Amino acid sequence: MRDIKCFVLFMMLLLPAMLTAQDATIKASAKSVVEVGEQFQVIYDINASVKDFRAPAFPNFDVVGGPFTSSSTSINMVNGSVNKIVSNKYTYVLKAYKEGDFTIGAATANADGKTISSNTLNIKVEKGSGNSASNASPSTSSPNTAVGTSSGSSEISNKDLFLSVNASSKTVYVGEPITITYKIHTRVPVSSVSVSKMPAYAGFWMKDMSDNSGVLKQTQEGEYTVAEIRKVILIPQKADGLPVEPMGVECVAQVRRQNSRQSYDPFEAFFNDPFFGGGYVNVTRDLLSPSMTIKVLPTPAEGKPVGYAGAVGNYTMTTEIDKTTLDANDAFTITVTLKGSGNIELAEMPKFSFPPDFEVYDPKITSSIQGVSGTKKAEYLVIPRHAGDYKVPSAQFSFFNPTKKQYETLNTPEYDIHVNKGSGGGESGVYTTNQESLKYIGSDIRHIMIGDPKLQSKGNLFFASLPYFLVVLLLILLFVVILLVVNARRKAMGDTIRVRNKNATKVARQRLKNAERHLKANNQNEFYAEMSQALWGYIADKFGIDKSNLSVDKVTEEMQQHSVPDEVISDFTQTLNMCEFARFAPGDATQKMEQLYQHGIEVITKTEKTL
């Protein structure tokens, strides 16, 4: 028996040396040289499951789209060793609007309680080859000048079409939520609207409350037709004057030519794309919402309860226990329900102080929250291990009420628990719990061992014996065999380009099946993510292109080198562009998804036949 224990201990000491751990990292990638007016992707690859991913600000670029997210998990088993590979990807589409050398800061995320950061990116923006006016940013063009699609169009003034931002309050306390709403106001028909610049919310916790159904609800306010573009809930995390940056929107309006007599109802034409007569012309306008500053006050130090955890709002609390009399090793549950409005999503639930010989599991947290109001429930599962009478003290939940400008404290009841002796005994004198390393229970000394102990001669040791050296030799031989097998496997998998090329169609087909499932379920974001992965992933695997270097120009160049017909190249690049911008285009979302799905199947089939 002792020999077996020594062998197990030796294996436990040897195996960690044969294993390697992979730290969580974020790798940022993008094109290093772009032109003014060119759109390009910034991709963040994360090799672990993370929380609270935060992208850096993009002050010298316009954010056209994103973040588009994707994730994958795979498990490999090699010679009894199990490896779990996790991959998360965040993609942003940016647009360069001025020349210069710029640096994109590091993204951050939380992995296993530690903050990890990505590398920074250096982007050089060169003068575009086309018309510089067409490549100019909204911020560099005159705000009162409309760009028409043909000559003779009338100008649109700032009173005809503008973007507004409204805050539910501009003076709040730390932790007090506010609602920010962006609206577009128009007196002229508008055919399409797309967000060109997403604002940054430094110092705030943010939750997007926008309606992502693709249909903007319209209202009539006097002479203006008004639609809500975006709504977010912000919770300030520090006391200061925190800025809310402007949001940029690009829209296309129809305006009357100066010599036209036709007229249209702005409300009927809002966000539609109908057939217009010769008296109207499309005009592109870039709108920018006003900037604002939120004054954030610290919660008062006077009267702050001990253990206050930052909850702000107005809450009520109810507590239930399923039983107070039970047997040892049986379980009971305490349920705490928090209800109200405020930063309830970030509020910490009450913490009970249970007796040391109670085994307590982490509480199960569930919530039902709409905006800043709702309920949050915590269920504490507790198992008493010994008979006796116990008391569960009252737990407290403290919060700051901004309406009354004072702290309030809610208390749970104090519970008396009677534990009967269970059928399994449960009366050992020493008991270890996760709250305290060791607790002695009972009034007398307990025997360490009872019965007839089996004793061994002191001279019969496993260490330095013949079996010991045989085991060591066997482990060394086993290690050599494993090393040879691993090297052979690495050589077999060395030709990654050939393997990727061979599996390109298979992977793309699986992605298309996933996209079809999201299409039937009308999951727009998941559908576009799978279609993008199918198209870009197929071409990357087929030609062995690193995903960080993927672009439409690179795809065209590779196809031409492999003698792909120009017609097929044009279809493929057009489908890629459709995939990137279909979600922002006006029209029936289901019809757009169906068309994109059919285009994707056809273009991959054509390319595969050609190659």
Image: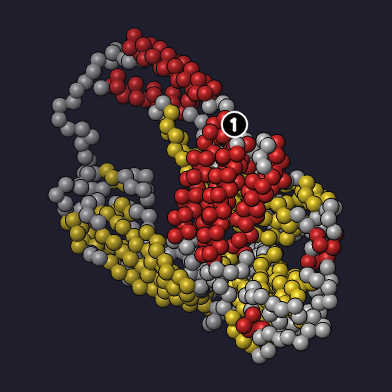
Seen from the viewer's position, the closer of residues 84 and 129 is 129
- Report x, y in % for residue 118: 65, 46
- Report x, y in % for residue 3: 30, 19
- Residue 11 relative to residue 236: left or right: left
What residue do we see at 70% from left, 71% from top?
A: 251
- Residue 596 relative to residue 252: left or right: left
Seen from the viewer's position, the closer of residues 453 and 150 is 150
For the residue labelled by badge 1, is the local secondary structure a helix, a strand or a loop? helix
Q: Quadrant of the C terminus?
A: top right
- Report x, y in % for residue 286: 75, 70
Placement of 111 over or under 461, stated as above or below: below
Q: Residues within 10 Å of mark 1 (few under 14, many from 20)?
A: some
Q: Quadrant of the N terminus?
A: top left
Q: Is residue 139 visible from the viewing direction of this image? A: yes
Q: Farthest residue toward the bottom?
A: 222
How was this image coloured? Answer: secondary structure
Name which quarter of the figure residue 260 lies in. bottom right
What residue do we see at 55% from left, 49% from top?
A: 602
Name which quarter of the figure residue 542 lies in. top right
Type of the residue with mark 1:
Ile
What residue do we see at 64% from left, 73% from top?
A: 273
Placement of 417 over or under 441, stated as above or below: below
| Location of mark 1 (residue) | 497
Q: Is residue 158 visible from the viewing direction of this image? A: no
Seen from the viewer's position, the closer of residues 225 and 269 is 269
What residue do we see at 37% from left, 25% from top?
A: 9
Seen from the viewer's position, the closer of residues 399 and 125 is 125
Name which quarter of the figure residue 82 lies in. top left
